[in-house]
Amino acid sequence: MIIPVRCISCGEIVGDKWEKFSSELALGKDPKKILDSLKVEKYCCRSTIITNVDLMDDIAIFKKRLVPSKQE
């Protein structure tokens, strides 16, 4: 759902690299080259970033339905 702040395996900080990674990936760049440019070298950190699925927009829909609006 949300990119982990740290790698699940080694504990290195990876959360600050997610925005740059996702924006360049949307432009059609190669994930390997993006991670190389971000200096993400360990396989565990690479897999933490690559396998993340951003579901915030999908979850936000349900949050809006569960919280009653002030107009009701």
Image (cartoon, helix red, strand yellow):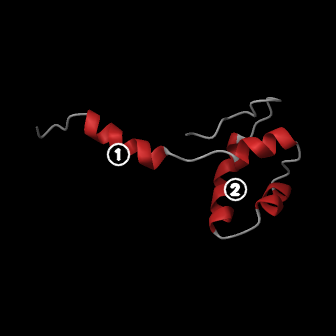
For the point 73% across and 68% down, which residue is it?
A: 29
Q: What secondary structure is marked by label 1?
A: helix
Q: Is residue 64 left or right of residue 10?
A: left
Q: Earlier in the sequence, mark 1 or mark 2?
A: 2
Location of the C terminus by quadrant is top left
Location of the N terminus by quadrant is top right
Quarter-wise, where is residue 14 in the image? top right
Residue 24, compared with residue 47, is above or below; it is below
Residue 18, compared with residue 23, is above or below; it is above
For the point 64% across and 57% down, which residue is it?
A: 22
Tell me the crowding category of disc 2: few under 14, some 14 to 19, or many 20 or more residues within 10 angstroms, Cα based.
Answer: some
Kind of residue at disc 2: Phe
Residue wearing tag 1: 61
Q: What secondary structure is marked by label 2?
A: helix
> In this view of the protein, which residue sits in the foreground, 16 or 51?
51
Quarter-wise, where is residue 23 in the image? bottom right
For the point 77% across and 66% down, which residue is it?
A: 30
- Give residue 31's position: percent from left, percent from top: 76, 60
For the point 16% across and 37% down, which residue is it?
A: 70
Tell me, for residue 21, which label it has, or none: 2
Tell me, for residue 24, which label it has, or none: none
Which of labels 1 and 2 is toward the front? Answer: 1
Kind of residue at disc 1: Ile
- Give residue 12's position: percent from left, percent from top: 80, 34
> In this view of the protein, which residue sits in the foreground, 44 or 13?
44
Give the alpha-carbon distance from disc 1 to disc 2, as whole Å: 25 Å
Q: Is residue 53 left or right of residue 7?
A: left
- Give residue 6's position: percent from left, percent from top: 72, 33
Q: Find the residue positioned furthest to the bottom.
A: 28
